[in-house]
Amino acid sequence: MSVPAHKPLVYIISAPSGSGKSTLVNELLKSVRDLDFSISYTTRLPRGSEENGKQYYFVSRSEFEKMIRDAEFLEHAEVFGNYYGTARRFLREAEQERHDLLLDIDVQGAAQIQQKLPEAISIFILPPDRTTLEERLRKRSEDREEVIQRRLITASREIENYDRYNYILVNNILEESSAILQAIVRSERLLRSGKPLSEEDAKTVALADRCRLANARDRLKRILDSFKPPDDSRTG
């Protein structure tokens, strides 16, 4: 008797640079079984201790453009003069291994994936506010001032897309945020299984539900307001 085909759950995670996404993703991959991570391809040069096949697959512009022509990408985009893309092969491999798939991509890539895979589960990670994001960018990086300012402007634009995502996770306290992200992934698996929920399962689903877009909107206003430009209007 043949084994029924496994359709992987696809999780999309997006966040402004400096939101702590990479740390949360690393903790998630350590804690949740049968979850594959799609390593993006890029034409940018490696930074610091980055290694090919770990943080990214580093390829030449001509190689990347050949992959585009051969329709090898689920999504791709050009950001700050470099290409980034998610290869289709990761989805095929997850299906063969009977695993789910995690994509760490920006809002441009997420929009492409959502068109092709409307059932994908999307999670947007927000910093607590603009000031905190700026502090994190300065602390973690040796970037020049103009680069930091450019990242903050880009973050403001990316954050405007928050309502295209299924879940909104505010990364304030790392341990709490990590537990919530794991709950979201596990909750979606539990709901897909269709099995009755144990008491523990119900707690997991409830924790994840707090971050569903419809349930998170009221808590987001202060964060979103912090990214708006100051009001220059004059009175009197």
Image (spheres, grey):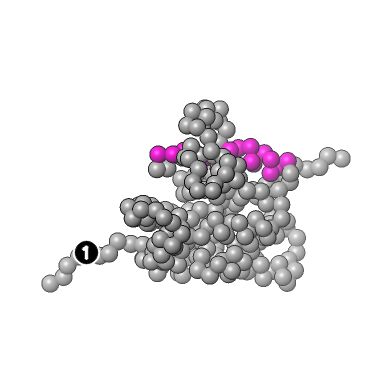
Residue 56 visible in the shown view: yes
Name the residue nearer the viewer: 20 or 90: 20
Circle 1 sits on which residue?
A: 232
The relative height of residue 118 versus residue 165 in the rendered view (above or below) is above
180 lies left or right of 171: right
Residue closest to the far front: 49
* Residue 74 percent location from the top left of the image: 56, 38
Label 1 element class? loop
Span shown in magenta? 81-96
Residue 84 visible in the shown view: no
* Residue 132 percent location from the top left of the image: 42, 66
Badge 1 density bin: few <14, some 14–19, many ≥20, Cα 10 Å = few
233 lies left or right of 165: left
Q: Is residue 88 magenta?
A: yes
Name the residue nearer the viewer: 145 or 79: 145
- Give the residue displayed 55% in from the left and 65% down from the top: 211
Q: Amino acid at mark 1?
A: Asp
- Give the residue displayed 62% in from the left and 60% down from the top: 27
- Give the residue displayed 56% in from the left and 27% down from the top: 70
